[in-house]
Image (tube, rainbow, N blue to C red):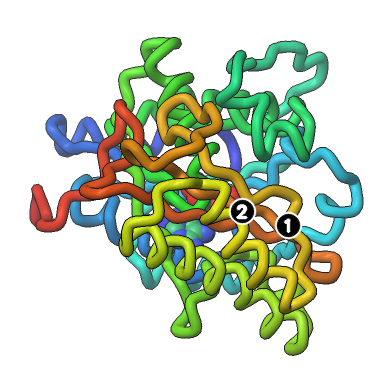
Amino acid sequence: MKIVRTVAALRAELREARAVRPAATVGLVPTMGALHEGHLSLVRAARRNDDVVVMSIFVNPTQFTEAADLAAYPRQEAGDTALAERAGVDLLFAPEAAEMYREGHATGVHVEGPLTATLEGAVRGSAHFDGMATIVTKLLLAALPDAAYFGEKDAQQLRVVRRMVADLGIPTRIVGCPTSRDDDGLARSSRNVRLSPEERSRALAIPRALEAIASAALLGETRTAELFARGEEILIASGVSAEYLAFVDPDSFAPRERLDGPVLCAVAARVGEVRLIDNVLLGAGATADSDAETIPRTPTKEP
Ligand code: AMP
């Protein structure tokens, strides 16, 4: 695995790889590091589908709307390098902030409407998705990958990226990958390491609430107000107060009152100082949003 720190070096490496194998496809896995099994599941999906796997590790300052959150974000480059290499990353792009935001940087990507104004956009402020959309665009332009891999754990982010790539005509396939969970059900997150043992056990109320909602939906409850009440009860019993527990159309992110089609149930909650998000897709035969492509069940190309 090679490590590169500049866009020029990344492009040079990819030019060389494409010169050797002109038909080689490139898969990009953008991350903020502090790697865990969730990130590695994205790498494995890329490894199955693409010939050259690029991972980026960049804690993007412009998508953090709280200075304390940015300062506390875990950084562990040495461990990340070993994990990335073992998972099959060919090229690790780990730039400094000054490389991605050169002196005088003045351009941003803004995705308008309910996709960015609701849920994460409402709680964290519009700067969050502006920062995310801008850095993902810059990473896609830097690597020009055939495919880029994102986790369904960040469902709204994935939807915003799909919108932006479609709107800007960026020729990269966006592949959504299922949420990877610890054995006890907690969605894996770089932020989990900041939970104390007591907080971690309280945080389990989040997947439990989502499971209760999903089983009530399976048993035929279609009123989202009822589903909300069941989930909220479980959260409150563990002393977890949700920033939102919302039922939205997975395509438009407009609120939904009934399960008369696929509905995304998304939750954000603070447990102690740590902000966690999770979601579940409800509705018979539910698939994600209209532009969705999820990872194929069987490899489309042998590594
Ligand atoms: P992050 O480093 O948190 O910005 O995440 C980088 C990518 O990994 C994003 O596409 C996330 O959605 C994805 N990701 C993070 N946690 C998980 C998880 N538990 N399961 C699947 N994908 C994840």
Q: Residue at x 19, y 48 (%)?
A: 49
Q: Is 265 displayed left or right of 99 in the figure?
A: left
Residue 221: x, y in percent?
Answer: 40, 55
Q: Is 196 displayed left or right of 171 in the figure?
A: right
Q: Nearer the viewer, residue 206 or 72?
A: 206
Residue labelled with disc 2: 267
Regarding residue 277, the answer to whether it shows in the image is yes
Element at badge 1? strand
From the image, which quarter does the C terminus lie in? bottom left
Q: Residue at x 33, y 57 (%)?
A: 220
Q: Is residue 30 above or below residue 170?
A: below
Report the Cα–Cα distance between label 1 and label 2.
7 Å
Q: Amino acid at mark 2?
A: Val
Q: Residues within 10 Å of mark 2 (few under 14, many from 20)?
A: many
Residue 142: x, y in percent?
Answer: 48, 27
Regarding residue 97, the answer to whether it shows in the image is no
Q: Is residue 303 above or below residue 136?
A: below
- Please count the marks in the image: 2
Q: Nearer the viewer, residue 36 or 145?
A: 36
Check contact, mark 1 vs mark 2: CB within 8 A: yes
Q: Residue furthest right?
A: 68
Element at badge 2? strand
In primary-sequence order, the first of circles 1 and 2 is 1
Q: Residue at x 43, y 49 (%)?
A: 152
Q: Residue at x 45, y 72 (%)?
A: 181
Q: Amino acid at mark 1?
A: Ala
Residue labelled with disc 1: 242
Q: Residues within 10 Å of mark 1 (few under 14, many from 20)?
A: many
